[in-house]
Amino acid sequence: MARAVPGTHDEILAAAARRFAVTGYKGTSLQDIAREVGCSKATVLYHFANKEALLCELMAPAIAVLEALDGQFAGRTGADAQRVAAEGFVDLAVRFRREIALLRGEFPDLLQQPAFAHIQQISERLVAAFAGHSDRPAARIAALVVLAGIAETCGEFLDIPDEELRPALLAVARRALKPTT
């Protein structure tokens, strides 16, 4: 039985999110999305210029929060930078964990796309803040491991309630980011 052709932008976005979660961004075609919605590829292209435009709209709220966080830790140093960056990123990761799950394994490739190029610079500043702006290799390594671990954990544990996940992530971050002597 054929489904009615959907006319809504939101149905296409929801189908894209489901497909990206199952087969990844690269593994999903516009035809796959159209098939899932029950419409033509032309209908998808009527609402979105291309697959990248779909992803951009799906990720726009998370990116806006990341950009705001970038401004919050700017100019902070040491433990203050670590605290603001860790709390802000954990909040972002917990809030947008479904979006993070969509990008698992594809994040480096997506940063190469023009629409996401600025995210690379924000990520570098976030790692520096997590490291307390230290030049010590151990601090930078811990920062990157914690940052990646937070994202990976949020993408993996979609079933853990926010009120349990957030404090657990912050506790791990605080332990891992303690200055080493």
Image (spheres, rainbow, N blue to C red):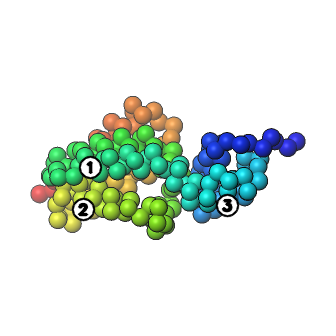
Q: Earlier in the sequence, mark 1 or mark 3?
A: 3
Distance of mark 1 from mark 3, alpha carbons?
Answer: 35 Å
> Cβ–Cβ below 8 Å for labels 2 and 3?
no
Near-viewer residue (132 or 119): 119
* Amino acid under disc 2: Arg
Disc ID at residue 140: 2
Q: Viewer-nearest of labels 1 and 3?
A: 1
Return the x and y of residue 89 as percentages of the image width and height: 33, 46
Image coordinates of residue 91 in percent, x first then y, are 36, 40
Q: Name the residue under label 1.
A: 71
Question: Which residue matches tag 3?
Answer: 29
Q: Earlier in the sequence, mark 2 or mark 3?
A: 3
Residue 17: give x, y in percent of width and height.
60, 48
For discs 2 and 3, the disc positioned in front in the rendered view: 3
Q: In which quarter of the image is the C terminus?
A: bottom left
Callout 1 amino acid: Gly
